Amino acid sequence: MSDNSAQTQAWKALSGEHHLAPFSDYKQLKEKGPRIITKAQGVHLWDSEGQQILDGMAGLWCVALGYGREELVQAAAHQMRELPYYNLFFQTAHPPALELAKAITDVAPAGMSHVFFTGSGSEGNDTVLRLVRHYWALKGKPTKKTLISRVNGYHGSTVAGASLGGMTYMHEQGDLPIPGVVHIPQPYWFGEGGDMSPDEFGVWAAEQLEKKILEVGEDNVAAFIAEPIQGAGGVIIPPATYWPKIKEILARYEILFVADEVICGFGRTGEWFGSDYYGLAPDLMTIAKGLTSGYIPMGGVVVRDTLVQVIHDGGDFNHGFTYSGHPVAAAVGLENLRILREEKIIERVRSETAPYLQMRLRELADHPLVGEVRGLGMLGAIELVKHKSTRERYTGQGAGMLCRNFCFDNGLIMRAVGDTMIIAPPLVITHAEIDELVSKARKCLDLTLNALNG
């Protein structure tokens, strides 16, 4: 261990004695202690023992511009000196929030020119639930309250966000989902497609939306909410037939469509939004993460003009947060969007780095442990299997977590969702850094296979 080990152990002790971490087994965490991350630059992190780690997950999908962008630091510092905080309640506003709202709508799909600011994507989806029900009540259709979501979708961990999400392990804690939220199957061909072709399965999965609308009753359905690509569920990229069929179904019914763009938004697919990539026309979009490159918390909901016209005439919307449109977060968001535009980062992702990443990732498909490699833009997934031809998994051996641990110990962060390894690196990753990522991934797949068969 390095000379820093005493300090590392002290920090680990503080974790066990004082800190309740998100999504953690506290007993296990206290016994092992967390890995202490102390600094970062570009696409790399360093832990307290001095190990350099390639961050293949951009933090939590959010560090779009990479670590150490001084412009974002300066934007925050300047705003803190000028106006460190003020709220947007009581008919007040401040320039950063107003200018960021305009900057967001400049790159949003056509006809979406208003933003409600929140502190996170979770708060954004709570806002969605309130907003769509308020909208339908103003339209004289107060029975339209139910939101349809997808099994294994992720929409946050607040009460409404976790309810909208389809993660059963989250629902088991807290008596969720709340009433008025129902779920349909996800378009996960590799895991659930059975003997159907991907195209057949895509149509089948989409048809479950219409089936659920008819089951609940169109007069009772407020909205369908979905991620263009499911992120935390395992980078589930729908078959090519899925979104066209969903659009057909939505056109037949009077319900709203909410695109959760928390992960896909701000360039991850090689377009500004996942909705742009798939040609969707959402009524509302939830945003966060890449909006500020994760440098400071911020989220929001972008709302279609036709909805805003109704809400404008509806009196008070009794909803909001102390930190809605926080001026420092808004200043960082403005600078982040300026860099994305002026350095043409999204264009470079689309034409150069994403095609290279996808080409290199697919080279891992020949590995004996890999059943499928899939990806789009700066998103990727590697399915770990026991038998390639049958897609049979290892049972009871935790192949995904085993691989994740090997990755961390060998200088790479890949996330495990069950036995699916996923990546979402910073948008600024270079060809050489992609080579590093793939090389380290192959090494860790080898180590995992040896451990599973040992």
Image: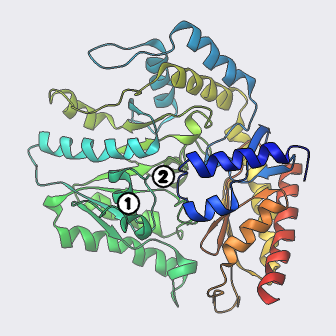
Res 254 quadrant in image: bottom left
Which residue, given by chain and number where applicable, does mark 1 sit on? Answer: 247
Quadrant where the C terminus sits is: bottom right
Q: Which residue is drawn at 56% across and 35% down?
A: 291
List x then y, in percent, for residue 151: 41, 69
Q: Which residue is drawn at 79% across and 64% down?
A: 407
Q: Judging from the image, what secondary structure is the residue with disc 1 in?
A: helix
Res 24 quadrant in image: bottom right
Q: Judging from the image, what secondary structure is the residue with disc 2 in?
A: loop
Q: Horizontally, is 201 left or right of 112 in the view?
A: right
| Mark 2 crowd level (few <14, some 14–19, many ≥20, 10 Å Cα) | few
User: Is residue 320 or residue 273 the one in the foreground?
Assistant: 320
Residue type pointed to by label 2: Gly
Using the image, determine if residue 135 lies above or below residue 75: below
In this figure, what is the number of numbered marks? 2
Do tag 2 and tag 1 residues touch (Cβ < 8 Å)?
Answer: yes
Q: Residue extending furthest top? A: 82
Res 400 quadrant in image: bottom right
User: Is residue 12 or residue 402 the one in the foreground?
Assistant: 12
User: Is residue 72 or residue 102 the one in the foreground?
Assistant: 72
Q: Horizontally, is 368 left or right of 145 in the view?
A: right
User: Is residue 30 or residue 287 the one in the foreground?
Assistant: 30
- Does the rendering let one see residue 17? yes
List x then y, in percent, for residue 274: 53, 50
Q: Distance between the residues labelled 2 and 1?
A: 9 Å
List x then y, in percent, for residue 360: 82, 63
Q: Can you tell which mark lies on residue 75?
A: none
Which residue, given by chain and number where applicable, does mark 2 sit on? Answer: 279
List x then y, in percent, for residue 1: 90, 53
